[in-house]
Image: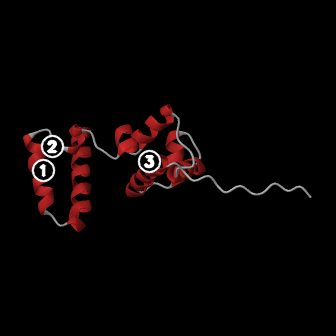
Amino acid sequence: MNEKPKSKPRQPDPRALAIGTRIRTKRELLGFTAEELGGMIGVTGNAVTQYETGRATAKPKRFEALAMALGTTTTWLLTGNEPDELARAQTKNELELLTLLREVPMDQHAILLAALKGMAASLQKK
């Protein structure tokens, strides 16, 4: 018998693995399943899992959709660095809000975020 020796699974590229980790972290933070995120960008949940494990890389157009669905930028997905305009307060009010938020215990942040989202939704209806 001439059986081919089984090849070892190819190890993901470290850069692809880092991008995948950021995708998974952001997805889990937002509470999406891989299937839900896949549906948002037009791929299967398995494809999202492939991205997250570094075994596949999204094409540029899909990558942009992925960043949008995750509420982040392609720069952050690629590098882990937020653009300055996202990482720093832009106005005096933003700085004041950030300062106040940092005074609140971490376990209370979700409550404040929910309240702010409710207020923003209410204001948008007016």
Q: Residue at x 47, y 37 (%)?
A: 63
Mark 3 and 2 residues: CB-CB less than 8 Å, in contact? no
Residue nearest the observer in this picture, 92 or 125: 92
Q: Which mark is residue 97?
A: 1
The secondary element bearing badge 3 is classed as helix
Look at mark 2 in the image and give the residue it sits on. Answer: 89
Q: Which residue is drawn at 38% across and 38% down?
A: 74
| Residue 90 relative to residue 35: left or right | left
| Residue 16 relative to residue 25: left or right | right
| Residue 114 relative to residue 19: left or right | left
Q: In which quarter of the image is residue 88?
A: top left
Q: Where is residue 58 in the image (x, y as percent from the top left)?
A: 52, 39
Q: Which is closer to the viewer, label 3 or label 2?
A: 3
User: Vertical placement of 103 versus 126: above or below?
Assistant: below
The secondary element bearing badge 2 is classed as loop
Q: Position of residue 122 (x, y in %)?
A: 24, 45
Amino acid at the residue labelled 1: Leu
Mark 2 and 1 residues: CB-CB less than 8 Å, in contact? yes
Q: Where is residue 10 in the image (x, y as percent from the top left)?
A: 62, 52
Q: Quadrant of residue 124?
A: top left
Q: Which mark is residue 111?
A: none
The crowding category of the residue bearing disc 3, from other C-alpha atoms within 10 Å (few below 14, some 14 to 19, many at least 20), is many
Looking at the rendered image, the quarter that the N terminus falls into is bottom right
Residue nearest the observer in this picture, 8 or 116: 8
Please report whichever mark, 2 or 1, sits nearer to the chain's N-terminal start. Answer: 2
Q: Which residue is drawn at 14% across and 51% down?
A: 98
Look at mark 3 in the image and give the residue it sits on. Answer: 19
| Residue 14 relative to residue 85: left or right | right
Amino acid at the residue labelled 2: Ala
